[in-house]
Image: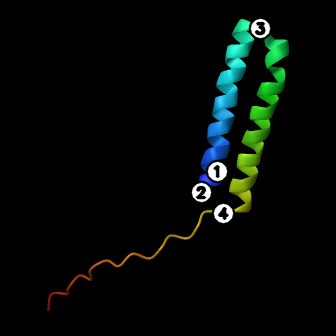
Amino acid sequence: MKLADVLILSLSLAFIIIGIHLSLTIGVEASYPVFMFAVALLFWFQYRRIQNPKEPEKPTSKPKKRKKH
């Protein structure tokens, strides 16, 4: 996962927590835009994951096993 993906996912989680706090203190009407922004960030995160498929793994050099003769 790239740094931008981690930041987008973290921001989305932060906005969800802020939205829950606003819902409990002020009301759902005040927290609705915050939740919508969090959902938009989640959609953006998913879009980025679909557009950039899993990066190919770097070949690692493993020691070769010796065959017994």
Q: Which is closer to the viewer, label 4 or label 2?
A: 2
Query: Quadrant of the rendered structure where residue 11 is?
Result: top right
The secondary structure type at the circle numbered 2 is loop
Q: Residue at x 79, y 9 (%)?
A: 27
Q: Which is closer to the viewer, label 3 or label 4?
A: 3
- CA–CA distance between discs 3 and 2? 36 Å
- CA–CA distance between discs 3 and 4? 41 Å
Query: Quadrant of the rendered structure where residue 26 is?
Result: top right
Query: Which dot marks residue 53?
Result: 4
Q: Position of residue 1 (x, y in %)?
A: 57, 55
Q: Which is closer to the viewer, label 3 or label 1?
A: 3
- CA–CA distance between discs 3 and 1? 31 Å
Tell me if residue 22 comes above or below residue 16 in the rendering: above
Query: Quadrant of the rendered structure where residue 41 is?
Result: top right
Q: Position of residue 64 (x, y in %)?
A: 27, 83
Residue type pointed to by label 3? Ile
Q: For label 1, count other residues whose C-alpha is less than 10 Å away and answer few (under 14), some (14-19) or many (20+).
A: some
Q: Position of residue 45 (x, y in %)?
A: 71, 47
Tell me if residue 45 comes above or below residue 59 in the rendering: above
Q: For label 3, count other residues whose C-alpha is less than 10 Å away and answer few (under 14), some (14-19) or many (20+).
A: few
Quadrant of the drawing holding the C terminus: bottom left
Query: Which dot marks residue 2?
Result: 2
- CA–CA distance between discs 2 and 1? 5 Å
> In terms of sequence position, does the residue under pointer 4 or pointer 1 come before the other?
1
Residue type pointed to by label 1? Asp
Q: Residue at x 82, y 15 (%)?
A: 30
